[in-house]
Amino acid sequence: MNIWVDADACPSAIKDILFRAAQRVRIQLTLVANRPLRISLLTAPMAV
């Protein structure tokens, strides 16, 4: 399973929740954005 997120439209609080949930259940989280993002390096999501 893979979670794809429109990171431009997603609030940072929700991204934090998604990072933790994806890490907990060990599924891939992919963030899609057209600008640079601040992300947690501990969770290592894929950015496109």
Image (spheres, helix red, strand yellow):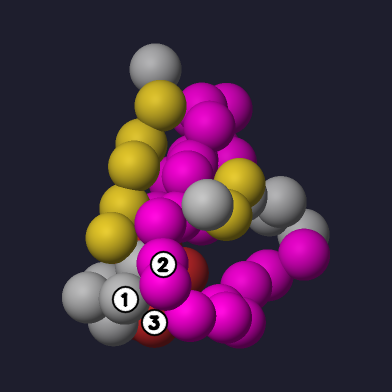
Q: Quadrant of the N terminus?
A: top left
Q: Amino acid at mark 3?
A: Ser
Q: To which residue does mark 1 refer?
A: 8
- Give the magenta part as a residue range: 18-41
| In magenta segment, residue 44 | no
Total marks placed:
3
Q: Amino acid at mark 1?
A: Asp
Alpha carbon separation for disc pair 2 and 1: 5 Å
Judge left or right: residue 46 versus residue 2: right
The answer to whether residue 15 is visible is no
Residue 10 rendering spot, x and y as whole percentages: 26, 73
Judge left or right: residue 37 versus residue 17: right
Hey, which quadrant is residue 7 in on the image?
Answer: bottom left
Residue 33, numbered label? 2
Alpha carbon separation for disc pair 3 and 1: 10 Å
Give whichever of 48, 3 is nearer the camera: 48
Discs 3/2, front? 2
Taking 3 as reference, is 37 above or below it?
Answer: below
Q: Residue at x 36, y 36 (%)?
A: 3
